Amino acid sequence: MNEHYTPAVMASLATQLTSRDRRLLRLVWTHKVLTSHQITRIAFHDPTTARHRLVKLHHIGVLNRFRPKPPTGSAPWHYVLGEPGAAVLAAEDDTDLAEFGYRRDRVLSIAYSQRLAHTVGTNDVFAYLSGAARQTSGCQLHAWWPEGLCATQWGTHVRPDAYGRWTESGRTVDFFLEYDTGTETIGRVAAKLDGYAALTAATGITTPVLFLTSSPRRESTLQDRLRLRAIQTSVPCATAVIGPGPHGPVWLPHDRRSERLRLAELAGHWPQPEAPC
């Protein structure tokens, strides 16, 4: 354990943290950065309670925060793991800070990363699904693997932005997520299906790939490219435009022209394999 975190210090932290706080620290560490809005959806029933608790967690140092400056308007607070929070998680894992892998400079560097918007956007999908699962009977987010874990598992062939498993009303769908902010060419985005085809060949498991796009116009263009590519690769895919409600009727399968499906309905649209995890 780091010499700054004596048993007395750790005992003091322990008395100030609830089980929800500890879960939240683990989520922030796993997903690198979560906004106040995302944390509210994931773990709280109302924004006021969330705001007060986050102020407390920031005050005792287990969470750090920053606020980016967008071109217009204002951004919510963005939260990352603080060093005392890392010490708490390291103690839970029966290890020290060095072995846990926490470095304050590396954690805070995401505030200046060109991938910040991409990371936050991908995490927004996770937050919306988590919130829907908490508030809606019959819904459950069984799994959500962020980019790093996906790269460890499947990086030889593909590097999806996330992998998820979602259930609604008895239907369960496994999927890979590609979060498209518009920085790559349409051709390069569509060509990612080749990697998923290679993964299917290597594992014998076919999992749908879902593309979230930055605008309706870009989605339409991507759909045109994906229809042919999906047929060539035998990889099922669907598109939607970035926004709230990713569990709702927003997904357009590559083999349809107009009718959009709910996320769980994709399970009945294509034959569902065993889960890849």
Image: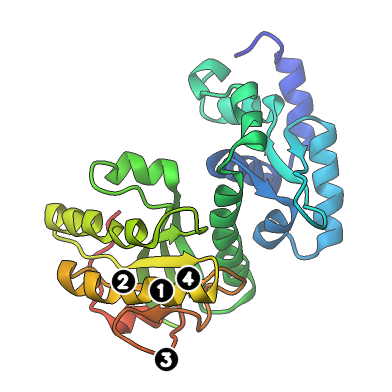
Residue displayed at 41% across by 81% down? 252
Q: Residue furthest top?
A: 3
Q: Residue 204 location, x and y as percent?
A: 13, 59
Q: Tell me which amino acid carries mark 3.
A: Glu
Give x and y (percent) for residue 94: 51, 24
Report x, y in % for residue 1.
60, 14
Q: Depth-wise, is mark 4 or mark 3 nearer the camera?
A: 4
Q: Residue at x 61, y 50 (%)?
A: 117
The answer to which of 271 and 72 lies nearer the viewer is 72
- Tag 4 and tag 1, C-beta contact below 8 Å: yes
Dot 1 alpha-carbon crowd within 10 angstroms: few under 14, some 14 to 19, many 20 or more: few
Q: For this view, does 146 lie left or right of residue 150? A: right
Residue 194 locus on image (x, y percent): 22, 58
Q: Which residue is mark 4?
A: 218
Marks 3 and 1: CB-CB under 8 Å? no
SS at mark 4 in the image: helix
